[in-house]
């Protein structure tokens, strides 16, 4: 079967570093998040996957308000990005290798006013991944055939959070990627029922692939970036979602509205819902849930 495994996890940069002012208990929670990512890495390795299909919301790297699509796919041979901290520090934590360019020993910070975890300001980026062009193209054409008018991009720039997940799950950069972008960030979000149907369509197309595909949805859980609620976390809603997935009720995620997701700080759940559409009502294994000061971090996987 082409789908050999699936997981969902946060892409929060807080999994990779702590600030000096944070206490030992906070650092312990950060380490728990790292340990959970290592559990998911084991699932990727055990699956024997050739390709990781990454479902990730774009943080204004490839798209902006001139055109911010609900869904898009990258079609190109190579994707690259910078990390959320120095490559040497990331390698120490995750073991992730990075590309060393002749005469280049460090990577500059983003220009003033640009978030430091963004990745579009330097041409030579430390993390470079091969892309499964054949599968990406088949998904693009197949989804359009099935009524999804899917935009595509030939810019393979990955933001720091996107790279972070690959630091943990693809540390040797030896697996091909398919990059599927969503809008889990800016209202109006895509409807959950559309996300679930999209996942079902992706699976239908992927079944014809000769590749072994691991599905990885990123994001969340509850947090409220850019709003007065930043710092609040709806732990009860997060627990409800994890319980639904653990019971194999993933299809019920399609019953939410976009406002349901946004009001509970779970806009990035659209990524998880697409993955649930691909998996169907198969129970997930909940690895951990961690509450940090402004976000809930949930880690799950499905065995296929």
Image: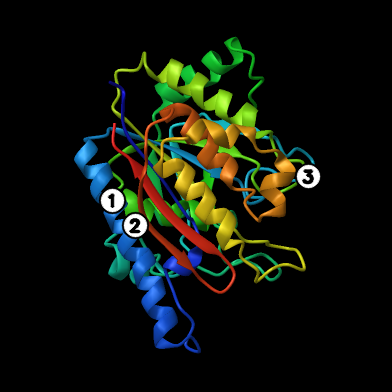
Q: Residue 167 in the image: x percent, y percent? A: 36, 56
Disc 1 from disc 2: Cα separation = 6 Å
Sequence-wise first label, 1 or 3: 1
Quick check: marks 1 and 2 in contact, CB under 8 Å? yes
The residue that disc 2 covers is 37
Quick check: marks 1 and 3 in contact, CB under 8 Å? no
The residue that disc 1 covers is 41
Quarter holding the N terminus is top left
Which quadrant holds residue 175?
top left
In the drawing, what numbered circle is on residue 65?
3
Q: Residue at x 44, y 80 (%)?
A: 26
Q: Is residue 301 left or right of residue 146?
A: left
Quarter holding the C terminus is top left
* Viewer-nearest of discs 3 and 2: 2
Disc 3 from disc 2: Cα separation = 32 Å
Q: Residue at x 37, y 41 (%)?
A: 284
Residue 171 showing in the rendered view = no
In the drawing, what numbered circle is on residue 227?
none
Q: Is residue 17 above or below residue 59?
A: below
Q: Is residue 231 left or right of residue 199?
A: right
Q: What is the total number of numbered labels drawn onto the structure image? A: 3
Q: Residue at x 57, y 37 (%)?
A: 253
Q: Nearer the viewer, residue 77 or 247?
A: 247
Look at the numbered disc 3 and give the secondary structure of its residue: loop
Q: Residue at x 63, y 33 (%)?
A: 255
Which quadrant holds residue 17?
bottom left
């Amino acid at each position: 079967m082409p789908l050999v495994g699936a997981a969902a996890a946060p892409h929060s940069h807080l999994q990779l570093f702590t600030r000096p002012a944070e206490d030992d208990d906070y650092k312990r929670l950060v380490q728990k998040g790292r340990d959970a990512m290592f559990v998911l890495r084991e699932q990727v390795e055990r699956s024997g996957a050739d390709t990781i299909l990454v479902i990730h919301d774009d943080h204004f790297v490839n798209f902006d308000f001139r055109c911010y699509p609900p869904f898009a796919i990258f079609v190109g041979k190579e994707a690259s990005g910078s990390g959320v901290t120095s490559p040497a520090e990331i390698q120490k934590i995750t073991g992730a290798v990075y590309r060393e360019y002749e005469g280049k020993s460090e990577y500059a910070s983003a220009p003033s006013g640009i978030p430091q975890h963004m990745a579009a300001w330097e041409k030579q980026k430390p993390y470079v991944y091969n892309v499964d062009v054949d599968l990406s193209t088949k998904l693009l054409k197949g989804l359009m055939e099935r009524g999804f008018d899917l935009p595509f991009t030939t810019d393979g720039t990955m933001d720091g959070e996107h790279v972070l997940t690959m630091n943990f799950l693809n540390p040797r950069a030896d697996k091909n990627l398919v990059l599927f972008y969503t809008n889990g960030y800016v209202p109006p979000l895509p409807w959950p029922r559309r996300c679930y149907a999209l996942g079902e369509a992706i699976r239908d197309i992927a079944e014809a692939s000769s590749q072994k595909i691991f599905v990885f949805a990123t994001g969340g859980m509850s947090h409220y970036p850019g709003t007065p609620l930043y710092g609040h976390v709806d732990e009860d809603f997060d627990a409800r979602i994890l319980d639904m997935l653990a019971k194999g009720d993933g299809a019920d995620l399609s019953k939410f509205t976009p406002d349901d997701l946004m009001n509970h700080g779970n806009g990035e759940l659209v990524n998880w819902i697409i993955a649930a559409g691909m998996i169907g009502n198969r129970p997930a294994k909940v690895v951990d849930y961690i509450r940090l000061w402004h976000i809930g971090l949930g880690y799950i996987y499905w065995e296929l």
